[in-house]
Image: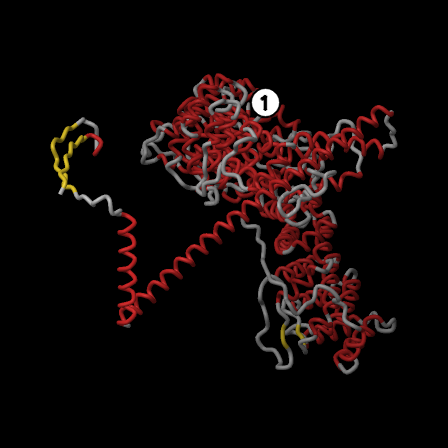
C-alpha cells in the first residue's frame, strides 16, 4: 500500500548541528538593512499603547507589507515577521479583520523563502525553525479560514511552487531546506494537538489529517514529534468522530501505519496498547458486507487490518479483552470463505488482500496464549485445513482451467499454508484431532503426481507443505511422528526428494533440506523407522554426499543441504545394522572423510561425531584406514592437522614443531587460562569440561582411539609429535580438571584435609611427569627425523659425487680420444701399449702346457614340456672339437 511518503535528500549546505547563527553575523546583516527598520516600526505600531487600537491603520500597513513581499519572505525578516504574526493572532480573536492578514501571510508562505546571500541559509536556520513553529500555533486562532489556509500552506511545502519574477539579487531556497528545518520545529506536534478543537468541523479536520499524513510519511523526525505528543493514541481515539468509512478514517489509518513503521515503533505500540484504542479500532472496522460496497471501503478495511496486525505484535495489546479479536476470528471463519463457496474467485484484488491479511493476523495473534482459546472456539484449524485441502483445488471443480489453480485461489492457499506453519505447532492437539497430517500428505501427493507440464506451478505448494511438516515434526512429539510414519510419509518424502533433485534453484534446495530434516526427526529415536528408511534412503544419502564436497561453496543453499545430509546419516542410518551395512557397502565412511577434508571447520564437528558413532560397526575401521584423499593422505594424516588447527585457534602453547612447551599446561587453552581466576557454581561445568564439547579435540581423540594409535600409515614426523599428545589427551584432561578443582578450592578459601591435599598434589605431579615423558618422546622423534634427514642428505651427496666422477672420467676419455686422432705419434704409442697389454693377458690365460681348443655345437633334439615361455623347451646339444 502506498504510504504517501516523500523521499528527499539532505541538503549538504545545512549542517545537522549549530543551527543558531552567531549574534555578530546577524547584527552585521541587520544593522544596514532599511527593511529591518520598517518591520520594527510595524511592530511598534502594533504594540504601542497609543496606537494599539488603530485597526484601520494596522490593516493598511500590514497589507502594504504583504504586497511588498508577494514573491516570498526574506530569511532575515522571519524573526520579525513571526513576532508580527503572533500579535495579529492575538488581535484576531476579538477582531476578525486581522484574520485576512494572517491568511495573506500564509498564502505568501507557500513560496520558498528568499535569500540574499548563499550564507543566509546557515545564518538564519534557527529563525526558520522558530517561524515554522509559530506558524503551527496559528491553529489556535478561532477562524476556520486561517486554519484551513495554514494546512494548505503546510501541504504546499511538499510541492515545488516558486514565483517566476524575482529580483536579480534574490534567490529562493530549495524545498528540501524548508522540509529539513520543518523536522526540527514544533509544527507537527502543534498540528496534532489542535485536533481536539476540530471535532465539529469535518472538512478542516480532514485537511488536518491529510497534512499529518504527509508529515508522518516523509520523515521519522516528524513521526517522533507527533509521537511525543501522544499522536498514535490521539489519532486512534478520534478516528471515529467523522464519517466512519470516509476519507478521514482512511487518513487516520494511514497515519497510524506511518507511525508504526517509523523509528518510534515501540512508542507507537505502547500508545495503542490500551483498551480505548482497541475499542476504537473495533468500532471503525467494517464487518458488514454492505459497509464494503466500494473500493475505498475495501482499501480502508485493509489499512485497518495492517494497523491491527502491527498492534497484535505487542503482547500487551488488549485485542482479546476488547472482543475485537473474537469479531475478527468470526470474520475470518465466515461461512462465505469456507466449503464450496471458497471456490469463487475474488472480484477485487482488495478482497484477496483482506483474506491474506486476516490469515497473516492469525500468525501474529497465535503468540498470545489468550488468543489460542478463541482459535479453538472459532474452529480456526478446521478453516485452515479446508483452505489447504487438495480437494478444494481439484481440477473437476475448476471448469476451463484443467489441472491449474485460479491465481487468486492459489495465493490464498499458499497464505493458508504459511499461517498453518506458524499455528500448528502451538495448537498441536487441534492439528492432530483434525487429521492435519492426512491433509498435508494428500496435498503433497497431489502436488507431485500432477502432470509434468504443470508440476512446476506446484512447487510453491510443495515448499509450503514441507514447511508445515517440518514445523510439527521439529517438536519431537511421538504421536505426530508416529502418525506420519503410519501413513507412509518416509517413502513419500523420499520420492518427493528424488523428484525435486532435478531442479537446481533455491526453492528446490530448501525443500530437499527440509525433507532431510523431517526424515531425521522421524527416524532419530526409533530403530524400526530407520529400517523403513532402508536402501532407498541410503542411496539418496550417498548421492548427496558424493556431490557435497564439490558444491558446498556453490551457493543456492548447497551448504545447508550438505549439513542436513550428514544429520540424516546420523539420525536415519547410524544405530541400525541393516542401514549401516548398506551405507558402508556404498563406501559411506570414505564419503564422510572426503567431506571432512573439503568442508570448513563449522561442519567438521557433526561429521566427526557421525564417523565416531559409525565406528561401533566393525566394518568401519578397515574402510577408514584404507581411505586416501586426492593428495594421498590417510585418515590419520587428515585428523592430526585438524588437531593442530584447533589448538592454534584455541591459543594452546606449542613450539614450532607442535610439541609441548610447558608441562604444567599441556592442553590449556587461552579461554581456560583467562577463566582460571573464576569460581563456578556446583551445577555449572567448568571451562575444562565445557572445552571438550566446544571444539574437535575430544572427537579426534575418540576417533583415533577407535582406529588405534599404532601402525597408522602416511604420517610425518610432525604428525607423530601431535599423535604423542593425542594419545595422552584423556590423562591430561583429567589432570586439568583436578587442577581446576584445586584452584577453585583456593579461591573459595577451602583448605582440603591432608590426605586430599596429598592426592591433589600427586595427581598434578603425575600429570607433569607424563607431560615431560611426552616432551622427551617428541624430542626423540624430532632427533630421529633429523638423523634421517642427515642420512638422506649424505646419500644425495654421495650420488652427486659419483655423478661428478663419472663426468670427469668421460671428459678425460674424450680428451684422450681427441689426442689419438689428432697426433700420429700418440696413436702409435697407444697401439704399442695395447699390443703389449694383450700379449700379457694371453700369457696369463693360456699356459704353455695346455693348448687352446675350439668347439662347434650341434642341436640333437628339441622337447616341448608344456610350460609357458622358454622354460617349456628342452634342447639337447652336442659339440665337436675343431
Whole-percent x and y of residue 608? 55, 33
Whole-percent x and y of residue 326? 61, 28
Whole-percent x and y of residue 111? 63, 69
Residue under pointer 1:
376
Q: Residues within 10 Å of mark 1 (few under 14, many from 20)?
A: few
* In this picture, residue 614 sits left or right of residue 735: left
Residue 650 visible in the snapshot = yes
Quadrant of image for the C terminus:
top left
Q: Nearer the viewer, residue 369 or 774?
A: 774
Instruction: Please report the residue visible at 53 percent of the width from the left and 39 percent of the height from the top.
Output: 715
Whole-percent x and y of residue 105? 69, 68
Q: Nearer the viewer, residue 785 or 78?
A: 785
Residue extending furthest toward the front? 849
Instruction: Please report the residue visible at 66 percent of the width from the left and 67 percent of the height from the top.
Output: 109
* Number of callouts: 1
Which quarter of the figure has residue 400? top left
Above or below: residue 803 compared with residue 118: above
Badge 1 element: helix
Amino acid at each position: 500500500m502506498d504510504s504517501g511518503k516523500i523521499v528527499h535528500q539532505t541538503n549538504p549546505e545545512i549542517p545537522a548541528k549549530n543551527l543558531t547563527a552567531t549574534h555578530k553575523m546577524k547584527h552585521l546583516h541587520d544593522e544596514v538593512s532599511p527593511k529591518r527598520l520598517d518591520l520594527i516600526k510595524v511592530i511598534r505600531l502594533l504594540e504601542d499603547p497609543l496606537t494599539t487600537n488603530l485597526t484601520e491603520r494596522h490593516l493598511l500597513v500590514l497589507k502594504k507589507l504583504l504586497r511588498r513581499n508577494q514573491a516570498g519572505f526574506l530569511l532575515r525578516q522571519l524573526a520579525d515577521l513571526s513576532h508580527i504574526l503572533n500579535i495579529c493572532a492575538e488581535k484576531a480573536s476579538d477582531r476578525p479583520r486581522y484574520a485576512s492578514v494572517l491568511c495573506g501571510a500564509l498564502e505568501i508562505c507557500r513560496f520558498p523563502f528568499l535569500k540574499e546571500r548563499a550564507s543566509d541559509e546557515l545564518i538564519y536556520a534557527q529563525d526558520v525553525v522558530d517561524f515554522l513553529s509559530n506558524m503551527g500555533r496559528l491553529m489556535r486562532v478561532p477562524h476556520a479560514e486561517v486554519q484551513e489556509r495554514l494546512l494548505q500552506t503546510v501541504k504546499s511545502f511538499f510541492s515545488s511552487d516558486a514565483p517566476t519574477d524575482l529580483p536579480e539579487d534574490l534567490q529562493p531556497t530549495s524545498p528540501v531546506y524548508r522540509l529539513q528545518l520543518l523536522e526540527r520545529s514544533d509544527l507537527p506536534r502543534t498540528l496534532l494537538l489542535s485536533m481536539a478543537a476540530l471535532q465539529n468541523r469535518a472538512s478542516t479536520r480532514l485537511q488536518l489529517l491529510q497534512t499529518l499524513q504527509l508529515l508522518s510519511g516523509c520523515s521519522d523526525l516528524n513521526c517522533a514529534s507527533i509521537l511525543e505528543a501522544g499522536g498514535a493514541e490521539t489519532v486512534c481515539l478520534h478516528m471515529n468522530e467523522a464519517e466512519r468509512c470516509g476519507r478521514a478514517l482512511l487518513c487516520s489509518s494511514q497515519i497510524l501505519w506511518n507511525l508504526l513503521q517509523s523509528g518510534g515503533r515501540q512508542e507507537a505500540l505502547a500508545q495503542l496498547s490500551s483498551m480505548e484504542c482497541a475499542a476504537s479500532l473495533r468500532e471503525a472496522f467494517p464487518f458488514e458486507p454492505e459497509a464494503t460496497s466500494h473500493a475505498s471501503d475495501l482499501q480502508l478495511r485493509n489499512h485497518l487490518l495492517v494497523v491491527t496486525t502491527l498492534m497484535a505484535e505487542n503482547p500487551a495489546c488488549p485485542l482479546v479483552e476488547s472482543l475485537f479479536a473474537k469479531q475478527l476470528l468470526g470474520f475470518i471463519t465466515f461461512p462465505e470463505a469456507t466449503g464450496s463457496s471458497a471456490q469463487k474467485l475474488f472480484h477485487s484484488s482488495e478482497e484477496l488482500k483482506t483474506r491474506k491479511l486476516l490469515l497473516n493476523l492469525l500468525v501474529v495473534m497465535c503468540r498470545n496464549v489468550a488468543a489460542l482459546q478463541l482459535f479453538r472456539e472459532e474452529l480456526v484449524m478446521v478453516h485452515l485445513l479446508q483452505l489447504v485441502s487438495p480437494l478444494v483445488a481439484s481440477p473437476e471443480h475448476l471448469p476451463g482451467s484443467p489441472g491449474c489453480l485460479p491465481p487468486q485461489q492459489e495465493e490464498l492457499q499458499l497464505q493458508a499454508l504459511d499461517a498453518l506453519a506458524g499455528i500448528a505447532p502451538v495448537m498441536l492437539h487441534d492439528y492432530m484431532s483434525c487429521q492435519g497430517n492426512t491433509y498435508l500428505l494428500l496435498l503433497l501427493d497431489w502436488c507431485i503426481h500432477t502432470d509434468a507440464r504443470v508440476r512446476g506451478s506446484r512447487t510453491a505448494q510443495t515448499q509450503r507443505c514441507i514447511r508445515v511438516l517440518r514445523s510439527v515434526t521439529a517438536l519431537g512429539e511421538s504421536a505426530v511422528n508416529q502418525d506420519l510414519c503410519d501413513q507412509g510419509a518416509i517413502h513419500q518424502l523420499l520420492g518427493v526428494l528424488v523428484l525435486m533433485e532435478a531442479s537446481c534453484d533455491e526453492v528446490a534446495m530448501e525443500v530437499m533440506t527440509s525433507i532431510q530434516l523431517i526424515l531425521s526427526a522421524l527416524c532419530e529415536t526409533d530403530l524400526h523407522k530407520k529400517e523403513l528408511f532402508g536402501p532407498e534412503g541410503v542411496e539418496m544419502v550417498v548421492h548427496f554426499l558424493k556431490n557435497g564436497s564439490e558444491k558446498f561453496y556453490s551457493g543456492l543453499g548447497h551448504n545447508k543441504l550438505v549439513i542436513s545430509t550428514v544429520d540424516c546419516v546420523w539420525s536415519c542410518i547410524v544405530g541400525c545394522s541393516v542401514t549401516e551395512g548398506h551405507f558402508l557397502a556404498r563406501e559411506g565412511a570414505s564419503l564422510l572423510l572426503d567431506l571432512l577434508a573439503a568442508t570448513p571447520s563449522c561442519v567438521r564437528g557433526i561429521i566427526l561425531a557421525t564417523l565416531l558413532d559409525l565406528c561401533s560397526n566393525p566394518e568401519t575401521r578397515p574402510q577408514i584406514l584404507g581411505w586416501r584423499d586426492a593428495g594421498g593422505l590417510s585418515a590419520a594424516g587428515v585428523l592430526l592437522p585438524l588437531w593442530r588447527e584447533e589448538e592454534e585457534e584455541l591459543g594452546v602453547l606449542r613450539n614450532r614443531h607442535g610439541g609441548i612447551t610447558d608441562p604444567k599446561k599441556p592442553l590449556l587453552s587461552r579461554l581456560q587460562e583467562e577463566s582460571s581466576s573464576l569460581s563456578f557454581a556446583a551445577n555449572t561445568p567448568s571451562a575444562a569440561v565445557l572445552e571438550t564439547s566446544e571444539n574437535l579435540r575430544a572427537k579426534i581423540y575418540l576417533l583415533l582411539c577407535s582406529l588405534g594409535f599404532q601402525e597408522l600409515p602416511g604420517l610425518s614426523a610432525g604428525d607423530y609429535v601431535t599423535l604423542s599428545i593425542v594419545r595422552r589427551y584423556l590423562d591430561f584432561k583429567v589432570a586439568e580438571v583436578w587442577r581446576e578443582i584445586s584452584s577453585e578450592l583456593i579461591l573459595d578459601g577451602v583448605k582440603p584435609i591432608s590426605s586430599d591435599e596429598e592426592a591433589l598434589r600427586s595427581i598434578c605431579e603425575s600429570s607433569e611427569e607424563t607431560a615431560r615423558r611426552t616432551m622427551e618422546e617428541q624430542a626423540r622423534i624430532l632427533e630421529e627425523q633429523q638423523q634421517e634427514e642427515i642420512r638422506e642428505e649424505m646419500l644425495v651427496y654421495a650420488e652427486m659425487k659419483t655423478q661428478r666422477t663419472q663426468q670427469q672420467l668421460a671428459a678425460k676419455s674424450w680428451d684422450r680420444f681427441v689426442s689419438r686422432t689428432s697426433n700420429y705419434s700418440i696413436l702409435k704409442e697407444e697401439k704399442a701399449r695395447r699390443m703389449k697389454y694383450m700379449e700379457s693377458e694371453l700369457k696369463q690365460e693360456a699356459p704353455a702346457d695346455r693348448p687352446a681348443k675350439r668347439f662347434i655345437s650341434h642341436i640333437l633334439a628339441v622337447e616341448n614340456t608344456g610350460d609357458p615361455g622358454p622354460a617349456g623347451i628342452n634342447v639337447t646339444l652336442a659339440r665337436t672339437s675343431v
